[in-house]
Image (spheres, rainbow, N blue to C red):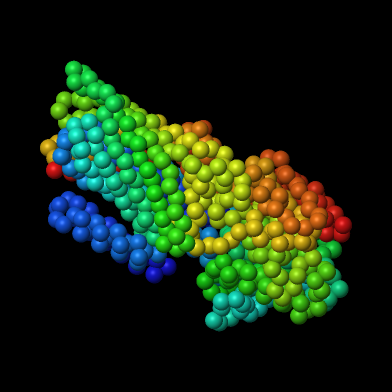
Amino acid sequence: MIKKHSSLFLFLVTSLLFACAPSRIIKPLAKGEQAIGANIGGPLINFGGLPIFIPYTSAFYAKGLNDKTTAFGSLHLTALSFGVFQTDIGICRELWYNPKNKLGLSANPAINFALDRWEWKAKLWPQLDMNLHKEFGSNKLLYLGLCNWFELSRIRPHGEVQPKNWFMSPQVGFQYSPKKWTYGIESKWVAPGVNNQPNVVDYLGPNHKGAIGVYFQFIRRF
Amino acid sequence: MNKQIEIATKALRLQVLFLIGISSKVSMHKVLLFTSLSLLLTSCLRLDSNLFNVSDKITEYKWDNYTGEQDFKLDASYKIQDSMMYQFTMDSKGNGDTKSYKIYGMYIGDLNRIATDTVILYCHGNKWHMDFYWQRAKLIAHTGGKHRFGVLMIDYRGYGLSDGPPSEEGLYNDADAAMQWLKSKGLSEQRLIIYGFSMGTSAATELSATPRSMRPHKLILEAPFASAAVMSADGAGLNVPASYTTNLKIDNAEEIKKVKQDFCWIHGTQDNFLGIKTHGEVVYKNHGGMYKEAHRIQGADHGQVPATFGFQNYNETLYKFIVK
């Protein structure tokens, strides 16, 4: 309908998935190692007949607490430009790693928190990313994973029942890390279990389910 | 718009500063703090204006000669004679206005009969101007037979040739200005029907719930939206507050609780824009009056209700509700 009625409520485009970002850390940093990163990207929408991704931006800081656990915290810059402070804070924990074939499994439990300066409305929702990663050579990493968001509220506006409380998004990504920099690209199928129609936003997802998201990430370790 | 661009530029500049700070590792925490606080406190990007789709600029109204995009087009039997079309302007100044705005209207019917006629005030959707909605207005003018009822349609401020910037309060003020015009022609409240489509349902509901110049006798809503909160939740999946993106206060789902007038709701079951379940059904359920009727039009998308329903069925439904 956004095609026909154009920008009517295009504003929802930006409200969509404020939580949208790639997995912060795939493989934990070494103990004491630090990293800062930024990313841009979001779900694909049909905009004037062209597929574009919503350019959400965020930045994060991470530090290796030990060789198996890295803590991170982020700031969502796009949300901030709308007067919304949003952060996701969590850890990346290596659950299993096989040094022989450089295959590992990590979990990123995190808390998303947002607060706007207009009505001072706060929202909190947990997130759990699970990623199976495989290293190629010394500086390439491929991963497959699941990003999970959890809606804690049981009701929607006007007292209606919240229809879904678990949003699972399969994802695949690749990182290239020459020296201290890491360049990453990730794609995820955001909420494939949710019909993307009817909706005010013209999301692009297979069979009108969810939305395909594309994200670019830049990380500097030091 | 210039202000928005300026603000966006400022936000972008701060983001760039932040990223530069990241890459140079210089006083990262200071840059972070500065950027966060600056953006949070100075940012005022809002998407309110995206509600109003006034992109198609015109220099005159063309009515039947309009060749642009329309939801449907009626055949020649629905033609309105020139003598029954009255294009005019009126001044609109209401709540929050510091000046009055000249807005355009089209009355279909006999001006001399307004004092004794029943009139349907049609509040159109968010798109463009009255030419886009002309076919709809003509169709409504055939409810109960041609010119059985008068029909008044206006372009809200910022739409079509109407002056001023569009705004939420402007919708209400302009619809109320239309009522003032009808009142000045002698129309009584008992013979005023208000009809809202899509975005226009906000004005129709608001002025039925909290009347200003006149209290409409009956309310008709086609493809209403529930609220900005529902739109936000629908768009996000998560129950994200609408205030994260907009300051719009439109809330039909709550306002209609105050509506005691008879209510007719029409919505397409395949509305892929304002879903019938999360929007229309909620509005219908919350109606605070004694009488309401629902018409769920199978297979109809947003904007396609009259065509999918069938023009005759559509007119008959409206007529029965109005004369009930």
Between A52 and B291, which is closer to the camera in this rendering?
B291
Which residue shows up at 68% across the image and 47% down it? B281
Residue positioned most to the front: A65
Residue at point 48%, 35% (across, down):
A166
Q: Position of residue B182 (x, y in %)?
A: 75, 75
Residue B225 as seen in the image, left or right of residue A23: right
Q: Quadrant of residue B112?
A: bottom right
The residue furthest bottom is B99
Task: Pinpoint residue A180: horizontal percent, then vertical percent.
Answer: 14, 40
Residue at x-position 51% and y-position 51%: B232
In the image, residue B308 above or below residue B134? above
Q: Is A23 rendered above or below residue B13?
A: above
Dividing the picture into quadrants, the one containing residue B68 is bottom right
Vertical placement of residue B260 versus B303, above or below: below
Residue at position x 32%, y 44% in the image: A89
Q: Name the side, left or right, on which B73 lies relative to A48.
A: right
Quarter holding the C terminus of chain A?
A: top left
Instruction: Answer whether residue B87 is visible to the viewer in this image.
Output: no
